[in-house]
Image (cartoon, grey):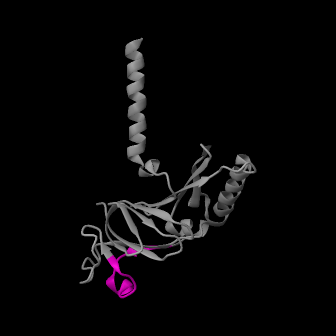
Amino acid sequence: MKKTTKMMAIFCLTASLLTACGNPMKKMDKNTVYLKKDNTVESLSVEDFDKSYYKEEELKSFIEEEVKSQQEARGEESVSVSEFKVEDKKVTLDLKYQSVEDYVQFTDTILETGTYNEQVFQDSFTFIDADSKEEVVDGIKEDGELQYIKIKDPEEIQVLVDGDILYYSKSIELVKKNLVKVPAGTESVILYKQKG
């Protein structure tokens, strides 16, 4: 009996770790948008849910109606609810989108992605080197090798990428090599090298 209990505990722990390792969003506890290598998007919203007049079922119904409306307009795969939960006076909503365009249509976020070209951003932004944390003076030489994300959100948001962030606009805070914090209402740019 003890052996079976130990095996079950090890199995549960392993499954838990694999789930967290497989999807980096499982480790997030703040509003985050994850731009994946396959061009799909996942967003996590974590908000206070601490007022007596807040009703979980009403919120859940509202979210389901919004998702259904987008699916009818843009296709069933355009957006789906991955997780909705209310716990410890917080509401967590994890949504998956088929494309960047689907994410933009569903949110108040301005978001653009593509391959970096110096001509696009010339003189528009002051970039910080992620390694040295110093302002880039001589320009960025990796044309055609880097991906860019240009984002503006009404709220502070984290941006997670499948790769390593090499440069970011001055307004951004680097959290990890693949995660930045973008201030509310500020157009910001992230340059990163996508995982092979």
Q: Is residue 124 left or right of residue 84?
A: left
Q: Position of residue 139 (x, y in %)?
A: 27, 83
Residue at figure coordinates x 62%, y 65% from the top left: 74
- Quadrant including the N terminus: top left
Relative to residue 59, is residue 172 depicted above or below? Answer: below
Residue lying farthest front?
A: 51
Residue 124 percent location from the top left of the image: 40, 85
Q: Nearer the viewer, residue 18 or 59?
A: 59
- In this view, the residue farthest toward the top is 1
Q: Residue at x 55, y 67 (%)?
A: 155
Tally the numbered discs: 0
Residue interval drawn in magenta = 111-127
Given residues 44 and 196, the one toward you in this image is 44
Locate residue 2: give its quadrant: top left
**Left or right, residue 53 beside residue 83:** right
Across and down, in percent, residue 49 comes to 65, 50
Q: Pinpoint residue 169: horizontal percent, then vertical percent.
A: 38, 75
Above/below status of 170 relative to 138: above
